[in-house]
Amino acid sequence: MPRRVDHEERRRQITDACRRVVARDGLEAATFQAVAAEAGVSVRLVQYYFGNKHGLLVATHRAVIEGSAARFGGGPPGDVDQGPADQPPPPRAVLRAVLAALLPLDDARRADAVVLAAFHAAALTNEAVTPQELRGAPRALVDLVSAQLLRARDDGGGTGPASGREDAARLDAELVLASAAGLTQGILAGHMDGETGLAVVDRLLDHLVGPA
Amino acid sequence: MPRRVDHEERRRQITDACRRVVARDGLEAATFQAVAAEAGVSVRLVQYYFGNKHGLLVATHRAVIEGSAARFGGGPPGDVDQGPADQPPPPRAVLRAVLAALLPLDDARRADAVVLAAFHAAALTNEAVTPQELRGAPRALVDLVSAQLLRARDDGGGTGPASGREDAARLDAELVLASAAGLTQGILAGHMDGETGLAVVDRLLDHLVGPA
């Protein structure tokens, strides 16, 4: 189906352009004109694919979230300390790799984080997008993190009924993701450098699953 | 000096109006015209006090930060479980009150958090304000939180050299504040309710200073 692939590529080309415009100049700057110019296509084509600005923004947000979910899609990111070849990688290493991958420690992730901050702010005040339209990926991440926490705690011998341990792991997973979001905010704003961010991540993991 | 007081009140009246406009309609909506209308004063008066939009925005951000710092200025917020009258309140109770006071659990704190999210996003992309201009209060909060963590751990009998324990408490204080920022973001966006946010806070305190 070459036709279908063309359409997807074209949509991706336009949402990529929109990401760049928002990361550089903010959400207000993402007009059809500016995005079409950035993508090197006609305004008419942007209209054809996305209808209106709202459609373009929601599709762009989804592209950022899907990109970051894809990083974790096949499990944790690639740079995990694997441990022995015949065993799954140690849960603490998986959790650290997930947290590190969520922080804006390179240009691409920084740009993604800036775009998500712009959408977050806009959803709280404008009608351009609503918080409901911006939901999505986080649930899968909560599942991934809480599964690794349970694995880490099983190895140490779990106590108490399984349901209580699962509830606790779920709250801890929310804590992990909230911490990542807060650290991202601090690093983007320049209140904290990336190295300190990773040191905080290591402290958090010390508390959650014990020292490395 | 009644003159001076008048000036301060007038400035406050205008930055309060600016906060309301930003909380309702976003940073882009905070034109001199809109803020003057909201404050019930002339555009000329806004110009007289703040010079340009940049001056108004920086003053408004400072007003939000100072308002939230004032909540902690005389120590922790008022609704701390005081414990025995002849002793300082237990550190865990202080930490919980600080964290709860940082979350957007009522309309006023929600409005403040929306305004801060708008400034954060704008500082990352626009020239309206820069991240440098938005720094300020967090350091005092890091000090407050890490002092309480050290108190909590002293009571349990500290181990290791004092400097190592202080460094650890500082990283943990950064973790506490990053968590509060991340939980705020999740609650504002409707990904999490306030009750779950407080349950995550309690888990965090369990990890940091042991069960209540």
Image (spheres, coloured by chain):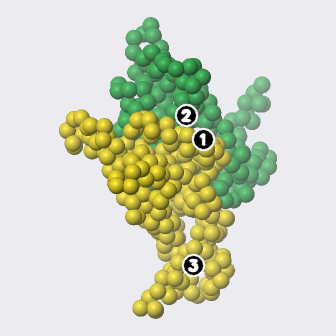
Chain colours: A yellow, B green
Residue at mark 1: chain = A
Type of the residue with mark 2: Leu
Label 3 – label 1 distance at C-alpha: 36 Å
The answer to which quarter of the image holds residue B63 is top right
Q: Residue at x 54, y 60 (%)?
A: A116
A26 w.r.t. A10: above or below: above
Q: Is residue A40 visible?
A: yes
Q: Residue at x 51, y 33 (%)?
A: B172
B45 displayed left or right of A10: right
The quadrant of the rendering that contains the C terminus of chain B is top left
B24 w.r.t. B14: above or below: below
Q: Nearer the viewer, residue B175 or A44?
A: B175
Q: Tag 3, which secondary structure?
A: helix
- Mark number, residue A14: 3
Looking at the image, the residue that sits furthest to the front is: A85
The answer to which quarter of the image holds residue B183 is top left
Q: Tag 2, which secondary structure?
A: helix
Task: Give the percent coordinates (x, y) of residue A178.
Answer: 46, 46
Which mark sits nearer the N-terminus, 3 or 1? 3
Q: Do the residues bearing badges 3 and 1 touch, measured as CB atoms within 8 Å?
A: no
